[in-house]
Structure formats: structure tokens, C-alpha cells
Amino acid sequence: MYTMNQFAAWKMFNAASVSCEGYLHRKENSKASDGAHSGMFSSCSNEPTRHLEQRIYWSCLKSELYAIYHFCSLTYANQTMRRELCSQLDTSHSGLNEVDYPHAFPSPPREISTSAAFQSSTSFFEQPRSAQTLTSSQSQPTSTTTGIPEDRQEDELTWFYYLAEIALRKVELSMSEIFSPPPPHPPSHSTSSSNASTPSALDDPPSRPIKLEDLLSSAHEFELQLELWYSYLPSVLKFPPDPRGPCHDERLQYLRQRYWFIASMVYRPFLYYLIHHHPPHSTLPQQPQHLARIREYARKGLEIDANFILSNVITHRHHGAWLTIRAITTNSLVLGAARMAGMRMPEGWREAVTAAKNCLVYWESEVRDAGALKGVVEKVERQV
């Protein structure tokens, strides 16, 4: 990933995940043959081994899924579509995410689990299953580091970061299944289907798999889940919501980037809906009661897209640089499409589009597709 060779990296992630999955199955089969019926990572495993196994599992799972979900993010691909994409890219999905893994999150190292900071703080990964429990009276969790050696503080920050990222990814996985389009239907040869090939039918955007009311309800639920996730972050991981506010640690910057990326996916369907179906000043004759909420979600989406670009234009190399470049390119095109559709634009949107173009110019000599992406963004910039 550091050398911008993302497909080679993905195959390495996949190979590691396949090895991890094989190890887990061999271990379980070995226990079954010995008459042990406790699941994977049972209490008989010694603590150092258990921690190493968990680290390997979560590292493999996060690395492989991080790439595949970014490749599929624009289409909200479901599991079947992700497998098809793997086939097209001459690779495979390890299936590690389908393993019946007994731990929702990795256990803390002993030195962290017994620390005063861990014992005294409310952990975000113990949050309720439903975001409906979110109330305005929630207290903000704190994490004190008084009396903890510096290396222990670093371990604590790293572990909390890992948990925060995993919890955020769980929200993303749920979103990808809810917002996934239906699988394509095989073409019908009956005469009654002839109207499906008319120009007007071909010009219509593909329909979403759920009703508009369900889509609005799901978006509200995911919005609350993200708010709940942020409210329960330990103080050492609280990143500034202001896009121009610097993060004091690189991990906070990665976490903020991930948070905004997922938040933009919550609102993207409503942007798509307004851009493709209705002029910005029209009404929805069939469901006018939903128009205000759709426009509000679209407004939030445009604001997040602009903020994402302004806070993530990169000029240094890191493991997620290639994915970041593609994300800011996508957001700049979304902003351009909204502008051409006559939608009300957020403050700083034009600056964001220019910043995305300049980022592509910077990486053009190292990223193979940056030049082509830059050409597309420049064309959109001229039109808006």
C-alpha cells in the first residue's frame, strides 16, 4: 500500500487471511478430535497465545475488508457483488469474515485491562445494540493517564484506536447490507418484457432495494449510531470535528477520515436521488412529506464531502494514501454533480474541488491512475 501497488497488497492481505482461517479451522478440528467442545480461543489457551491469535485475526480481517469495501463503496455492494468483484480482479475472498468468531472485539492486554484509565472509563464498545438509546443526557467518557508510564499510555492509545476502528467498521458493514442494490436479474425473453428495453427505461437510474420510508429510517438509525460512537470515544481519541482543526496524533487523523467517509455513505443515496430524479426546486408529488428530510440529508452529505476533502488532502505517504486519493476524487465528483444539478452548495465546496485536483497533480507521477482521475476532475471543475 505504501508503494501504491494496491492489488498486490490485496492479494497479500488475502493470503494472510486464508492462512489465518486455515489455522482457526485446524485448531477447532483438533479440539473436536480430542473431545473438547469449547469453541475457538477457549479458556484453556494461555493468555499470550490468545492475544497473539486475536491480533492476527483482527489484523487480517481489517486489512482485507478495508480494501474490498473501498473498492465497492460507490455501489454499496452486497456479499454476492463483492465476490464477483474479487473474481474480476483475479483474486478471491478468504471468507475469514464468515468464521464464527467468538469475540466481538479483541481483549485488552493485561497491563491495560488492569490500569486505572481502563477501569475508570466507560468503554464505547459496551454501547447498547440499538442507537435508539442515545440521549442528550449522556456523559462524556474520560480517560486519565495519571501515574501510567509513557509506554503504557502509548499501548492504551493504540488499543483504544484499534477498538474504535473495529466498532466503526461494524457500522459500515451493516450499512453496506442495508443500502445494497438488488442483484441484477437475468434478461427475460418474454414479449411482456419488451418495454424494459425502451430508451426511457434505460435512462432511469437503478432503483434502491427498499422503500423511501425505510431508507430514511435506516439513515436516521445509522446517523444516531455514528453520533453514539463518537460520544463514547475515550478522550485520547477525540478528534476535532472542525475539518481545519489539526489532529495531534496521526491515528486520530485516520479515525476522523474513516468516520467522515462512513458518514458520507449514509447521505449519499439522498444525493443520488435528488440529482437523478428531481430538479432541486421541485416537489415530490407522491411523497411530499419526505422532501424536507431528503434535502436535509443531501445537504449534510455535501457538507461532509467538502470537509472530507479539505481535511484529507495528503502530501505524505501512508498505508491508506491510495484509498484516500480515490475517496477525495469521488467526493469532488459528487460536489460537481450536485452543482450541475442546481443544488444548494456548502461553503468551501469550490475550494474542495480545487484541492482534490491539486492532490491528484501532486501524486500523478507515482499513482498510475491519478493522471486519468485528474483529467476527469479538471473537466468537472471547468463545467461548474
Image (cartoon, rainbow, N blue to C red):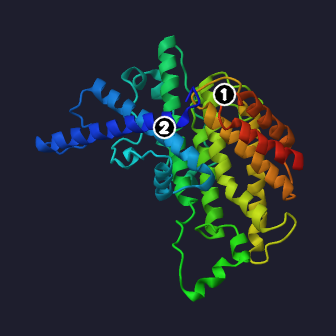
Residue type (three-letter) at the residue carrying disc 2: Trp
In the rendered structure, find residue 366 and report the number of the disc placed on it: 1
Q: Nearer the viewer, residue 380 or 21?
A: 380
> In terms of secondary structure, where does tag 1 sit?
loop
> In terms of secondary structure, where does tag 2 sit?
helix
Q: Counting other residues with Cα less than 10 Å from the Cα at mark 1, is it few (<14), some (14-19), or many (20 or more)? A: few
Q: Residue at x 65, y 34 (%)?
A: 368
Circles 1 and 2: CB atoms closer than 8 Å: no
| Mark sitting earlier along the chain (1/2) | 2
Q: Position of residue 120 (x, y in %)?
A: 49, 28
- Quadrant in the picture for residue 331: top right
Q: Position of residue 228 (x, y in %)?
A: 59, 45
Q: Quadrant of the N terminus?
A: top right
Residue type (three-letter) at the residue carrying disc 1: Glu
Q: Which residue is mark 2?
A: 10
Q: Position of residue 124 (x, y in %)?
A: 52, 38
